Amino acid sequence: MQESHTDENAHPLKNKILELLTSSGIEKTECYRRMLDYTIEIFENQGLGQEYYGYHNIDHELEVTYITLLAATWEKKLGKLNQSDIEYLYTAALFHDFDPQKSVDRPHEESVIRFISLDKNLKKLIDDAGLDIEIITALILRTSYPWTGEFKEKPEIQMKECFQRSKTTRDNSEKQAHYEELGWFLSVADRIGGYAIGDFTVAMEKAKKNAHAFAWHQSTIVRMSVNFFETLLNNESKMCRRVLHALPEETRKNFMNTVLSFMKLRQDEIRIESEFEYENQKFQTKVDSLEERDSDEFIGALTSIYKELPQPLQLQKSGFAKSILSPNTILTTLRLNDGNDTIIGYAKGGPLEDYRLYAGIKDENYGKQNTIFLEPIAMRLGYWGLGGGTRLRKVFSLLANSKRYRYLTSFALRDLIQKRMGSENVEFVAMLDPEHWDYYRVDLLGGIV
């Protein structure tokens, strides 16, 4: 029996993957362990560790590897896959988003392939394992999503080229079909993996990270997530059922509970939209005094909404509650006219000098005491896209103007800033890639934003 390598300080999934490698019967466990260590090292060194803003960080890479290996090991017991299949699936899963120098969060399969083929250390690890890099490349190409149109046409041609270069699959249509199916298996495991580990809270945070990384507006998070799951379950039902059936019951339940929870949230969004459209539900804004802010109920309500923001937008990791009570803080809340003045959103900010902005951003007005910084506007899920954010921003700008601030700065999605440039005195200060969550400035003397 092979010795299991464990590390108490390792990534939470690392030891689980190593245990699966041993139990799956892979002979060259040490070689595959080095692959795992190298992947974690590269991601961490390139700033793509657990603190990375996007969805495609080391967490995702290891989650997909774990889920793929877990499902493949069970399929081997059923006689559907052999030992070689498991080794190829493990390696392709581990490297499927191996794009450390990414220009956007979503890894580009061609960039991944280029990096793998040029990285000498990686190539040696693959050679030491006795694997064919052409087959690994073909499997990774099959993870292109969605597998339709241009996302399918080019990778499909490239896969055929890989099969022709490989001695194993050259002129062997049966082998090629087998690895095409393995690639499909990996593609579905990739999309299930991120939402099968952990509860719905974990899944929602991943969805928010994914939305932020793709520069989607907050109003689209739930809708896009539901579309993602429906496409997976309906259009790829055969392989989806196969992968899910190969996973433990608890893991399957996690995934399906996540799907159902997103669908319920979507129903809630539609209900709320209907109430505003047909039942005379309305927003109202309120400028809350320091005395009104100084209550546990008020602070608790705002803190709860703040925590719904994607983590990259939570600029005050500590001290949020304290800042609510600062006399320098400008704050306005968005409420429902439901008889209880229920708080469902807020706009909050203060002097630019009170904030530490992202690394690399240099504001020429820093230290001049003439700029108010508007933190990311926050609202409850379900209320985005109904005009509340615009109302909060306008009231906040009026308050800043009344306090003699010359400029307002904040962060927003690039396309939203560009839309406002035609009618408002808005300018880019720093354009942040790859997330397109940019830092902009407004001249308040030129008109209220």
Image (cartoon, grey):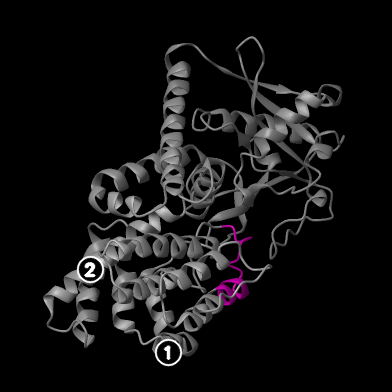
| Residue drawn 43% across the image and 59% down it | 67
The residue that disc 1 covers is: 128
**Visible in this render: residue 134?**
yes
Specify start and end residues of the magenta stretch as a single range: 40-53
Q: Per the image, is 183 magenta?
A: no
43 part of magenta stretch: yes
Where residue 278 appears, x then y in whole percent?
Answer: 42, 13
In which quadrant of the rendered view does residue 319 lie? top right
- Would residue 404 appear left or right of 132 to someone viewing this image? right
Occupied quadrant, residue 267: top left
Classify 10 Å Cα crowding around label 2: few (below 14), some (14-19), many (20 and above). many
Looking at the rendered structure, the secondary structure element under dot 2 is: helix
Depth check, front residue: 41 or 15: 15
Crowding at dot 1, Cα within 10 Å, few <14 / some 14-19 / many 20+, comes out as few
In this view, 142 is above or below 321: below
Return the x and y of residue 30 as percentages of the image width and height. 51, 82
Whether residue 143 is visible, yes or no, is no
Sequence order check: which comes first, mark 1 or mark 2?
1
Q: Quadrant of the C terminus?
A: top right
Q: Residue placed at 24% from the left, 75% from the top? A: 158
* Count of marks placed on residues: 2
Taking the spot 63% from the left edge, 36% from the top edge, the residue there is: 378
Secondary structure under tag 1 reads helix
Residue indicated by mark 2 = 180
Q: Which amino acid, by three-letter code, is at mark 2?
A: Glu
